[in-house]
Image: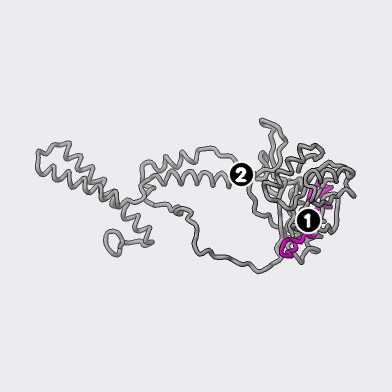
C-alpha cells in the first residue's frame, strides 16, 4: 500500500523495492493515479514492464498490477472495485491463479469482496491460488496492538477464509503492517496486509541433503539444574523481563533468553565430581600427615557433602541421558 503513487519520489521507492527483492510482479494498492497518468507512472518505474488496473470500476485505480513480461505473463480474469483476479504463467509453464486485494474500509462494503473470494474458490480449482493484499480488517485479536476483541467484521473475514478453504502463507518481516502514525496511548498498529493460498493437492517432494548444515547443539534441559541454588532466581529474573510482541512471541523470547542463562550452569557434573574427589583426597592426605584442627575437620565435612551432592547430580545426569529409572551397569550407567 503506497498511499499515493503520483509523487516521483514514490516511483523511486517502488523501483528500489523491486530491485532489492528481485521482484518480477507487484501489486500496488491505493495508487491514487488517474487513468490518463497510469502509463507515465508505470514507465517511470520500469519502462519494460506491463500493467493492468481496476480503473474501469475505480476512478483512482485502487489496485494496479505490474509485471516483467520477459519472465511471466498475466491475464486478468475479472476486475472489481476491491480486487484484480487473474492467471499468471510463470517460467517452466507453471500456472497459478492470483488475486490482488484492497478491501474497502466499510464492513458492509467488504461483503462483496468476501463473496468474490468464495466464488473464486470454486472457479480457481484447477491451479494453485494465491491471494494477497490489504484486506482492511484483521483476522485475530492478537493482530491488533491495543485490543484483543474479535469484531463482527473479523468474523465476516474468517467465515470467508474458511468457506474458501484458505490458509495464511508463512511470512517474515515486521508483524504489524499498518499504523495510525500516532504516539502514546493513541498509537494503534494492525496486521491488515497478508498473503493466503489454497493448494492444488499436487504431490509433495522432499529433497534430502547429503550433508546437513551444522546448526548447533539442540537444547536439552538437565534435571539436576533444578537443584542449583540459583535456578529459581534465574528463572524468575528472566520471566520478569518485558518483551514486545504477541503473547506466543513473548513466551518464545523469554524461553530463548532463559535457555542461554541455563546453559551457563554446569553441563557435565561428572567432571565436577572428579575435581571435588581430588580435592577431598588431597585434604585427607593433609589431615593424615599433620595436626588436625576443628576448622580443617569442618572443611573436610563440607567437601564430603559437596562430593555427595555432585555424585547425585552425576547419577541424575546419566539416568536422564540413558533414559532409565535405575542404575544398571556401574556408577555412570555404562
Span colored in magenta: 87-114
Q: Is residue 286 above or below residue 118?
A: above
| Residue, disc 1 | 69
User: x and y percent of residue 5 in the render?
Assistant: 80, 40
Q: Quadrant of residue 12?
A: top right
Q: Is 292 displayed left or right of 121 in the figure?
A: left
Circle 1: is it few (<14), some (14-19), or many (20+) Cα within 10 Å?
A: some
User: x and y percent of residue 185 in the render?
Assistant: 67, 31
For the C terminus, the quadrant is bottom left
Tell me if residue 92 is in the magenta stretch. yes
User: x and y percent of residue 41 in the render?
Assistant: 82, 43
Q: Is 7 displayed left or right of 145 in the figure?
A: right
Q: Is residue 35 above or below residue 169?
A: above
Q: Quadrant of residue 32?
A: top right
Residue 79 vs residue 52, the one in the foreground:
52
Disc 2, SS: loop
Coloured how?
one colour
One can see residue 75 in this view: yes
| Residue, disc 2 | 246
First along the sequence among labels 1 and 2 = 1
Q: Quadrant of residue 250?
A: top right
Number of disc labels: 2
Circle 2: is it few (<14), some (14-19), or many (20+) Cα within 10 Å?
A: some
Q: CA distance from mark 1 to mark 2?
A: 40 Å
Tell me if residue 242 is in the magenta stretch. no
Q: Is residue 286 above or below residue 87?
A: above
Residue 330 vs residue 197, the one in the foreground:
197
Amino acid at each position: 500500500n503506497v498511499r499515493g503513487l503520483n509523487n516521483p519520489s514514490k516511483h523511486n521507492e517502488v523501483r528500489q523495492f523491486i530491485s532489492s527483492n528481485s521482484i518480477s510482479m507487484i501489486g500496488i494498492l491505493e495508487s491514487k493515479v488517474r487513468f490518463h497518468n497510469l502509463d507515465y507512472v508505470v514507465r517511470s518505474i520500469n519502462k519494460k514492464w506491463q500493467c493492468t488496473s481496476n480503473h474501469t470500476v475505480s476512478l483512482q485505480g485502487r489496485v494496479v498490477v505490474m509485471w516483467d513480461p520477459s519472465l511471466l505473463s498475466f491475464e486478468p480474469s475479472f476486475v472489481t472495485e476491491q480486487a484484480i483476479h487473474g492467471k499468471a504463467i510463470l517460467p517452466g509453464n507453471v500456472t497459478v491463479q492470483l488475486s490482488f486485494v484492497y478491501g474497502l474500509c466499510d464492513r458492509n462494503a467488504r461483503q462483496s469482496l468476501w463473496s468474490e473470494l468464495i466464488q473464486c474458490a470454486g472457479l480457481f480449482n484447477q491451479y494453485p491460488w494465491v491471494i494477497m493484499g490489504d484486506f482492511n480488517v484483521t483476522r485475530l485479536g492478537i493482530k491488533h496492538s491495543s485490543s484483543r476483541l474479535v469484531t463482527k467484521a473479523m468474523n465476516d473475514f474468517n467465515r470467508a477464509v474458511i468457506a474458501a478453504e484458505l490458509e495464511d502463507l508463512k511470512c517474515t518481516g515486521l508483524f504489524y503492517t499498518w499504523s495510525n502514525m500516532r504516539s502514546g496511548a493513541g498509537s494503534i498498529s494492525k496486521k491488515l496486509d497478508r498473503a493466503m493460498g489454497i493448494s492444488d493437492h499436487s504431490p509433495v517432494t522432499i529433497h534430502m541433503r547429503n550433508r546437513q548444515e551444522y546448526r548447533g547443539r539442540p537444547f536439552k534441559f538437565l534435571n539436576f539444574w533444578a537443584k542449583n541454588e540459583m535456578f529459581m532466581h534465574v528463572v524468575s529474573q528472566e520471566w520478569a523481563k518485558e518483551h514486545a510482541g504477541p503473547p506466543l512471541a513473548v513466551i518464545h523470547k523469554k524461553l530463548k533468553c532463559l535457555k542461554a542463562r541455563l546453559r551457563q550452569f554446569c553441563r557435565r557434573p561428572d567432571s565436577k565430581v572428579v575435581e571435588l574427589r581430588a580435592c577431598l583426597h588431597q585434604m585427607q592426605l593433609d589431615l593424615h600427615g599433620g595436626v588436625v584442627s576443628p576448622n580443617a575437620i569442618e572443611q573436610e565435612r563440607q567437601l564430603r557433602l559437596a562430593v555427595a551432592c555432585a555424585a547425585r547430580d552425576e547419577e541424575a545426569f546419566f539416568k536422564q541421558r540413558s533414559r532409565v529409572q535405575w542404575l544398571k551397569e556401574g556408577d555412570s550407567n555404562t
